[in-house]
Structures are given as structure tokens and as C-alpha cells.
Amino acid sequence: MLLTFTLIILLFLLFIDIPISFALAGSTAFYIMFNDSVPDAVLIQRMVGGIESVPLLAIVFFIAAGILMNYTGITKRMLNFAQIVTKPLPGRLAQVNILLSTMMGGISGSNVADAAMLSKILVPEMVKKGYPKPFSTALTAAGSLITPIIPPGIAMIMYGFVGNVSIGKLFMAGVVPGLMLCVIYMIYIHFLAKKRNYETESRGWPTAKEFFFSLKDALLAFTLPIIIIGGIRFGIFSATEAGAIAVVFALILGLLVYREMKWKHMVESIVETVKTSASILLIIAAGSAFGWILTLEQVPQALTNFMLSHVESSTMFFLIVLVFLLIIGMFVEGNVALIILTPLFMPMLQAYQIDPVHFGIFFIICLSIGTLTPPVGTIMIATCAITDTRIEDFVKSSLPFLVLLIIAALLIAFIPGISLWLPNLLS
């Protein structure tokens, strides 16, 4: 009964728009206050213990690296490369949008940051070229969902930490699914652009000089994910150390190679990093305390027993989880759902003999879909606010992308090799 009241309070606090971390901490405090067998100090102990971990430093480092990259000039060089590569394709700016999201995913690790940046840079240009604003906004939002599964995705670090799964293997597992989703989007845009006559005029193929000149400028950005995966694979450094290396790499690019970063940018980057990291770490801390309650009440074991008694095959398990996460994603922010649900799913994965690395990529994709759906879709709200697009128009334009994302999630679920091929090859 106490757990039921705790869940009701959590939902009420979320409903009245209390910040997520405070809603989790508040509902946990209620449970502890009225549970005589639990000391009051447990709340603080569990919150501090939840973030007192070296692997979580990777989140801070990769956030800092992504923010610093915005001041290095690397974004405009990658944009130029994407424009050259997509030169002969119909719907060129839309193709650039998707390709740039994929490339930026290997740098920032944050889908919100990428969506915000591309909404400012590309959506106004797309509108000038005749693309409807709702479509341009929905495309930008959908493209940013490639970021969480391209290393160094912050969501993979959080899942690996909470679920005790190798972050290095998760990084490797996300490469192929991320590229697959990029290709799926670009194929869709190819046919849609021809149908709606978006930038279908012939521009010819890029010359070898254009290609290699633009590649030279963007090449250093491509080396970061290779350094991260290669270093982790060969045991040169851990995922946390890789984050520190990414920060040093960004500083070298900005201060010594491109020389576009100013010292005032350093201060701005530090402030932005502290704000972003603090919001994520507060959610992890409060989520850890709330997760402890669920474990104390043996909720994971109860759910596992329930699933095993009603669902026999892993195929049906994946389908049920997909539908469940699509519904959850409509009402709960992705990071919160990841923190709370990961401990619940782990016993089930063992029962159904599902690789936690394989499930992690599927899990993150499904949660990412929720960021595009009302009422609390973070990417939807952020992009619509920046581009001044009505939510209703965004929802209509995003439907084809939601279908493509669900197809991608099902492919990842039922073809384990998509996510496990690279980790198995490099293991």
C-alpha cells in the first residue's frame, strides 16, 4: 500500500510539472518517512551513492567535449562535407540534415544539443528552399535520435552504469544501428523529395578536388569516435578516460588546429557543462534512490515472475516491451525512464537469455521515440520552440518518422547481429 501511494505521489508531482529530479526525490522521501523500518538518512545515502561512481565521470567529460566542439569550428566543416557528399541527391538539404546529425552524434552524445543546433542552422535554410517548416522541424528532431546510439551517446553510458553492462561494448554495438537508421532516413527522403519536388534539380557529382578538400577539413572530427572505440577495444583506456581524451581532443582542435576557440568560450563552455551535467546527475541520484525502493519492495522479481508466467518467447517479450516503452515515452522523460526501468528489465533479460548489450540499443531507441511524442517529448518541445512550429503541425509531420523508427527498433530486436556484430568482431 505504501508503494502504491508513493507511485501516486510521483505521478502527481510529474503532472503538476515539478522538476523530474525533485519529483523522484520527493516521492522517495515520502516512502522513507512513513516506513518505520527505514532510517531517514537512507535517502541522502542512496542519492549520494547513486552518483559516487567513476564511470559517471564519462557523462561530464563527453558533455564538456560536445560543448567545446561547438566553439572549434568543426560543425561548419562537417556541414560543408555533408553538402558535398549529398550534392547529387534529391532533397539535398534534408539529406544534409540527417548526415550531419549522424556525424555530430560521434562528437556530442546529446540528442537535445544536436537537435537545438540543427534547428537554428538548417531549418531556416530548408524553409527558404521550399521545405514546409513542420516537415523541416520534424526531420531535424527525428535525425537527432541517431545521436543516442552513436558513440559516445550519453544514454548508453547511463544504461551501462545502471545495468552494470560494458559501456565499451555498448559504444561498439551502437555504430551499425546508428548508420542503419541514417540510411533508412536518407532512402525515405530520396523518394519523398522526388514525390514532392524538393530540390530535385540536377547538380552533378562532386569533383574529386571538392570531395577530398572537404574531407580533409572534417577528417579530424571522424577520428574521435574511432579513437574512443579503438582505445577501449585494445584496453588503452576506459570509457571514462576516453571522455577525458575527448575533452583534450576538442581543446587541441579549437586552440591549436583551427584556432577559432577564444578564451571567453572556455568560460561559457564550463558554465554550460556544469548546468547540463548537474541536471543529468540529479536525475541519476534521485532515480537511484527511487530504484532502491523498487528493489526493496521486490518489484523487479515480481515483474519477472509475471512476465515468465504469461510470456513464453523472447519475440513476444520484445513486442510487449516496445509497446510499453512507446506508451511510457509519451509521459515520462527518457533519462528518468532509463534510470527507473533498467533495473526492472535486467532480471527479465537473464530469464529470456537476451544479451544486455543487444537489449540496451533496442531499449534506447524505443525510449528515444518518446522524445518526439506529446505531451512531454523533450526533442519535440525544444525544436518547436526554436523554429516556432505548432505542436499539432509537428505531430502530423513526424508520423512517417515514427513509423521508420519503430521499423528500425523491430529490426534491431529481431536481428541481434545488427547490434552485436561489431562487438563480437572486436572482442
Image (cartoon, rainbow, N blue to C red):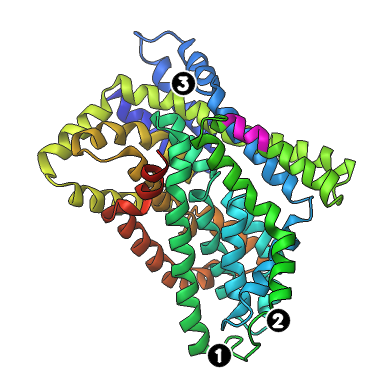
**Number of marks in the rendered image:** 3
Which residue is disc 2 drawn over?
A: 128
Residue 224 coordinates in the image, percent (x, y): 63, 46
Find numbered disc 3 in the image and state the secondary structure of the residue it sits on.
Answer: helix
Instruction: Return the residue nearer the eye: 80 or 338.
Output: 80
Of circles 2 and 3, the one toward us is 2
Residue 64 coordinates in the image, percent (x, y): 69, 39
Q: Give the amino acid at mark 1.
A: Asn
Of circles 1 and 2, the one toward us is 1
Residue in the picture at 48% in, 36% down: 168
253 to 356, vertically: above or below: below
The magenta span reads 240-245
Tell me where residue 211 sits by quadrant.
bottom right
47 to 170, vertically: above or below: above
| Distance of label 1 from label 2 (alpha carbons) | 14 Å
Of circles 1 and 3, the one toward us is 1
Which residue is disc 1 drawn over?
A: 197
First in sequence: mark 1 or mark 3?
3
| Distance of label 1 from label 3 (alpha carbons) | 57 Å
